[in-house]
Image (cartoon, rainbow, N blue to C red):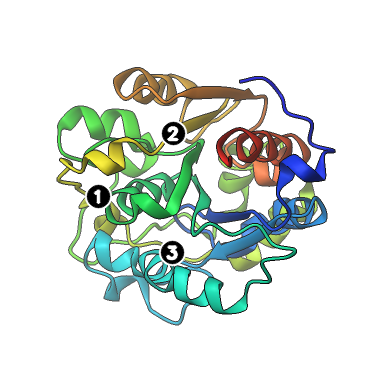
Amino acid sequence: MEEGNTGSSSRRKKGAHLVLVHGLGSGAWCWYKVRCLLEASGYKVTCVDLKSAGIDPSLPDSVHSFHDYNQPLLHFFSQFSSSQDSNSDPSSTHYDGKVILVGHSAGGLSVTEATYWFPDKIHAAVYVAATMLQHGFSTPQDMIDGVPEIVRLSGSGPNETSDTTDDTEFQRQMNYHMSPHEDVTLAMMLRRPGPINALRGAKFSGGNMDAERVPRVYIKTMQDRILKPEQQEAMIKRWPPSHVFLLDSDHNPSFSAPFLLSAFLINIAECFIK
């Protein structure tokens, strides 16, 4: 993909919309740097809290299926056209009923499900150090490729949630080892346990040819200690996206490389929004 002229407001189509989805244990808050950078460049940005994440009031052990966990994103898309149509100013805002949908880490599962439900509302699906599996966790190989080892080898009780969210040193060494200290502090104040079993149950039936036509882009994090580069590469080979970007960052480039990540997202928007 050739880099577009990100300084050209005519190509940027002022108001083009990006929707950002967080990973397990995180929330919409994790995108605060990227959101500011994108909005400063003229884009509309929505950051979604999935069920039991961020400021959503649900408890993680009340989430019993992936579809339930992903309801806030699916609800956003179900309401998207009517709300945008009523508030848009056609003279100043680019709106065609579609977004660039971006998922980080386990948020890639949310992105994939959304493409099956709402393919006509998505310009492109972007996976940032994310689980990118065509049919979700349908085979043992899916678990090997798409689940961090620390999660895959943990227990599987009926109400299991992630249990390392309050281990600051673990998070610092595994999740955020290239991220600024202040961002790690913020993360440790805001992270919540996530419904691991609900995510393990993510399965997509496929067969939606419209969904298969949604372009996919993968942003591979080369210093990742959570979803390792070899796992990311295995998913890329099994279900090849149209483009792959390489980012020298830890698992959370929204903290460790926000300027480069934002530049990649702008480049993607320039390419796929006609």
- When the figure is inspected, residue 83 is found, relative to residue 272, above or below; the finding is below
Q: Is residue 55 visible?
A: no
Residue drawn at the location 85% of the way across and 38% of the way down: 7
Q: Residue furthest bottom?
A: 57
Say which element carries label 3. Answer: loop
Q: Name the residue under label 1.
A: 200
Within 10 Å of the Cα at label 3, are there few (<14), some (14-19), or many (20+) other Cα atoms? many
- Amino acid under disc 3: Pro
Say which element carries label 2. Answer: strand
Q: Name the residue under label 3.
A: 193
Which of the marked residues, 3 or 2, is nearer the chain's N terminus?
3
Q: Can residue 246 be seen in this view?
A: yes
Q: In this view, does 105 lie to the left or right of 219?
A: left
Viewer-side label of 3, 1: 1
The circle on residue 216 is 2
- Amino acid under disc 1: Arg
Which image quarter is the N terminus in?
top right
